[in-house]
């Protein structure tokens, strides 16, 4: 009884010290304030008023929004274990133990309509609850599908890039919808790598993982497809907008691969400037501007505010990448800021988290990176690019990932040397 009273007193104090937030309407709370624009922009504007930790009531869902690297560090590093969980809607049914029988439902995974649509019944590795099932899927993901040697051997990726180059060569001098072609290419990459019957490792995976578990990787590859395509499109857009950067990147690719006659993944590590172009693109245009939601598993205190059990936490990676305290001329595309810098996207630097950080960092980073680096290098090596008369629209469109509202249309022209693919 005494312990129960103590816990009740602690919870009461934490409730009284929830982070500040905007006024709320009955029933819908703050949902009306997120309508009509890009959510990550709205949350930035609200955070400028209410602070780096902001409380919102989204209907019945109590939510805290994180908007600075310092606050994100508390969530994703200091208290990472507490916030490694996903909201219940996206989680398995805890009443059933993992692996009790065949199929996703038998593994304790929800089979209701909403979770099925959002996260393959909770079986997807991105949405799986923090626990034994997630650990097993993550282990398989890294050891079988996404280890560095496996990624580097993806002949299928090279083939898809070659198909794109063939299409471009057939349309030299004419405007093409490069954004559409990039998406088609990356979608082909991910589906062929993940599900090709020529892949012996994949056959071994199917036989080694119990029935229904293969779905665990579908959300991973689907998300990486959009991540890669949107990043390549944004990078090309930024380079065309800033010719100095495009010319510098093209010169580097030509210097590294000119004598070889073609671009292959074995020497991509030498493209130091192209790598910082990609980093700067991810800083300004993170594929998931709002990282996948977390759920607090134990009441705690962050920056003097109380975070209660079951509160949902959303990290605004987009605004963190534009934080003026950490980035000089934060709104400017300036890849050189990353030269001679140890900042990378693997979660160690909380001011730069396009793939998240902590336990729930995206396991498909290496795959996504290759899907970005190789196409960009080949697009710059084989072609020069100019804008059509209608110019360039950099407006965002919010969806599963943040993409350009108007797809990128460019005119390709030959760029020497022009060898066979």
Image (cartoon, helix red, strand yellow):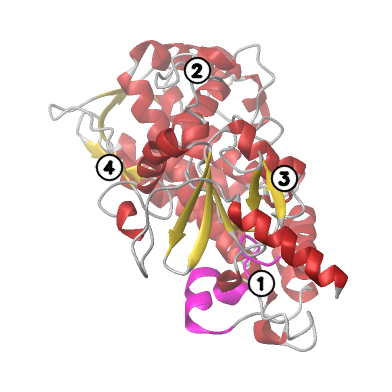
Measured as percent of width and height from the top left, residue 194 is found at 61, 61
Report the residue at 47% width, 42% height from top: 161
Report the residue at 79% width, 69% height from top: 5
As helix, strand or loop, the secondary structure at mark 2 comes to helix
As helix, strand or loop, the secondary structure at mark 4 comes to loop
**Contact, CB < 8 Å: mark 3 with mark 1?**
no
Dividing the picture into quadrants, the one containing residue 371 is top right
Q: Mark 1 sits on what residue?
A: 214
Q: Which of marks 4 and 1 is nearer the N terminus?
A: 1
Q: Mark 4 sits on what residue?
A: 407
Q: Which mark is residue 335?
A: 2
Disc 3 from disc 1: Cα separation = 24 Å
**118 magenta-colored:** yes
Disc 3 from disc 4: Cα separation = 33 Å
The crowd level at tag 1 (other Cα within 10 Å; few <14, some 14-19, many 20+) is some
Out of 150 and 217, give the one closest to the viewer: 217
Q: Earlier in the sequence, mark 3 or mark 4?
A: 3
Q: Earlier in the sequence, mark 3 or mark 2?
A: 2
Numbered disc in front, either 3 or 4: 3
As helix, strand or loop, the secondary structure at mark 1 comes to helix
Disc 2 from disc 1: Cα separation = 38 Å
Numbered disc in front, either 2 or 1: 2
Residue 298: tell me if it is visible.
no
Q: Is residue 110 left or right of residue 5?
A: left
Q: Which of marks 2 and 1 is nearer the N terminus?
A: 1
Q: Mark 3 sits on what residue?
A: 358
The crowd level at tag 3 (other Cα within 10 Å; few <14, some 14-19, many 20+) is many
**413 magenta-colored:** no
**Contact, CB < 8 Å: mark 4 with mark 1?**
no
Out of 262 and 86, give the one closest to the viewer: 86
């Amino acid at each position: 009884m005494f312990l129960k009273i103590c816990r009740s007193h602690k919870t009461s104090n934490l409730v009284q010290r929830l982070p500040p937030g905007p006024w709320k309407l009955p029933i819908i709370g703050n949902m009306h304030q997120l309508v009509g624009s890009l959510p990550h922009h709205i949350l930035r504007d609200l955070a400028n008023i209410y602070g780096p930790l902001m409380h919102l009531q989204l209907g019945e869902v109590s939510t805290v929004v994180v908007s600075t690297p310092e606050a994100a560090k508390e969530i994703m590093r200091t208290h990472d274990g507490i916030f490694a969980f996903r909201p219940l809607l996206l989680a398995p049914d805890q009443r059933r133990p993992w692996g009790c029988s065949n199929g996703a439902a038998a593994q304790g995974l929800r089979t209701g309509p909403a979770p099925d649509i959002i996260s393959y019944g909770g079986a997807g590795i991105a949405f799986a609850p923090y626990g034994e099932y997630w650990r097993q899927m993550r282990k398989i993901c890294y050891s079988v599908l996404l280890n560095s040697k496996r990624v580097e051997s993806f002949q299928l990726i090279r083939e898809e890039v070659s198909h794109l180059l063939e299409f471009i060569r057939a349309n030299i001098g004419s405007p093409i919808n490069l954004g559409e072609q990039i998406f088609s290419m990356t979608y082909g990459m991910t589906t062929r790598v993940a599900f090709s019957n020529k892949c012996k490792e994949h056959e071994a995976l199917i036989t080694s993982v119990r029935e229904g578990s293969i779905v665990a990787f579908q959300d991973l590859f689907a998300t990486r497809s959009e991540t890669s395509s949107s990043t390549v499109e944004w990078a090309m857009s930024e380079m065309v907008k800033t010719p100095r950067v495009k010319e510098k990147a093209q010169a580097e690719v030509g210097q590294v691969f000119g004598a070889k006659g073609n671009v292959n993944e074995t020497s991509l590590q030498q493209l130091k400037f192209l790598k910082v172009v990609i980093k700067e693109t991810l800083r300004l245009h993170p594929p998931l501007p709002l990282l996948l939601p977390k759920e607090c598993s134990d009441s705690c205190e962050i920056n003097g505010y109380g975070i209660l059990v079951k509160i949902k936490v959303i990290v605004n990676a987009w605004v963190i990448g534009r934080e003026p305290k950490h980035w000089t001329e934060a709104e400017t595309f300036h890849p050189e800021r990353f030269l001679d810098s140890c900042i990378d996207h693997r979660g160690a630097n909380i001011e730069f988290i396009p793939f998240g950080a902590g336990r729930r960092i995206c396991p498909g980073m290496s795959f996504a990176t290759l899907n970005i680096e190789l196409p960009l290098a080949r697009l710059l090596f084989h072609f020069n690019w100019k804008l059509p008369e209608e110019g360039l629209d950099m407006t965002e469109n919010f969806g599963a990932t943040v993409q350009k509202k108007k797809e990128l249309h460019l005119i390709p022209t030959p760029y020497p040397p022009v060898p066979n693919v």
